[in-house]
Amino acid sequence: MKIALVGYGRMGKIIDEIALKRGHEVVARLKQTPTAENLNNPDVVIEFSLPEVAFDNIKACLENGIPVISGTTGWLERKPEIENIAVQNETAFLYGSNFSLGVNLFFALNEKLADLMKNVDAYSCQLEEIHHIHKLDAPSGTAISLAEGIIKNNPKFEAWKLEDTQEKQLGIFAIREDEVPGTHSVYYRSEVDEIEIKHTAHNRNGFALGAVVAAEWIKDKKGNFTMKDVLGL
């Protein structure tokens, strides 16, 4: 496939390496706003940029009829607009807060545990995420996805918030530390014990590989998708 990379930071460079190893051609490596000219006619765009420019980047690609895989977090209040643009332009959009296979299995496990705990009143729930000091948004997109999975399956919670859980608001501790690629934990605590599920990323390669696999999967499809579709979860 011909792949255009929009946003060429740490993740973009790792995705570049993996795409080439998997036999694809990278036809654009952009740090500026994508246009029909500088995208160089790709089959798909993989977008890992910054929260403040993600919407415009994705919109420009979709309006040129190019499917987009996006892993940029911190802009999701405008995601419904993007999904409408994808449909209007008869192309495809896939957003992932995290493309790692392990994390997407963790999402499924988290939802199952939330469903099991919904009628057990002795336990409170708290989330924690740890990332490198360069990460601009907090909480992470992955932590938000975990929180939304709990809220969907446990009627005790109606929304998430930073810091401590309070009544119907599920708490997320966001910690920025050294060069940590990403650690996410979900705790259920009672007076007598604690249940914890945890995912620890050792490097960014898993995220990058998942994004390339998603790009391979989305070619020639139309509509809006998630990693659940890619992995059949």
Image: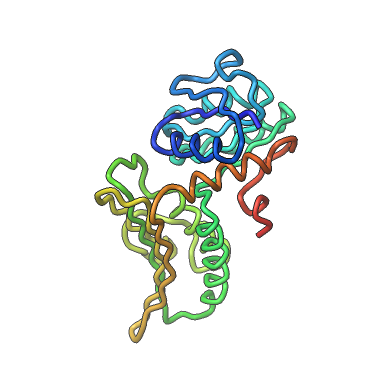
User: Residue 171 sits in which quadrant?
Assistant: bottom left
Nearer the observer, 148 or 140 = 140
Q: Indicate the quadrant containing the C terminus: top left, top right, bottom left or bottom right.
A: bottom right
As displayed, is residue 41 above or below residue 143?
above
Residue at 61 percent across and 34 percent down: it is: 24
Residue at 52 percent across and 63 percent down: it is: 106
Q: Is residue 43 visible?
A: yes
Indicate the position of residue 55 as horizontal and vertical percent values: 52, 29
As displayed, is residue 205 above or below residue 87?
below
Q: Does residue 27 appear to the left or right of 192 in the view shown?
A: right
User: Residue 95 sits in which quadrant?
Assistant: top right
Residue that sits furthest to the bottom in the current view: 192
Indicate the position of residue 190 as horizontal and vertical percent values: 37, 81
As displayed, is residue 63 above or below residue 204?
above
User: Residue 185 sits in which quadrant?
Assistant: bottom left
Q: Indicate the quadrant containing the N terminus: top left, top right, bottom left or bottom right.
A: top right
Q: Does residue 217 appear to the left or right of 205 in the view shown?
A: right
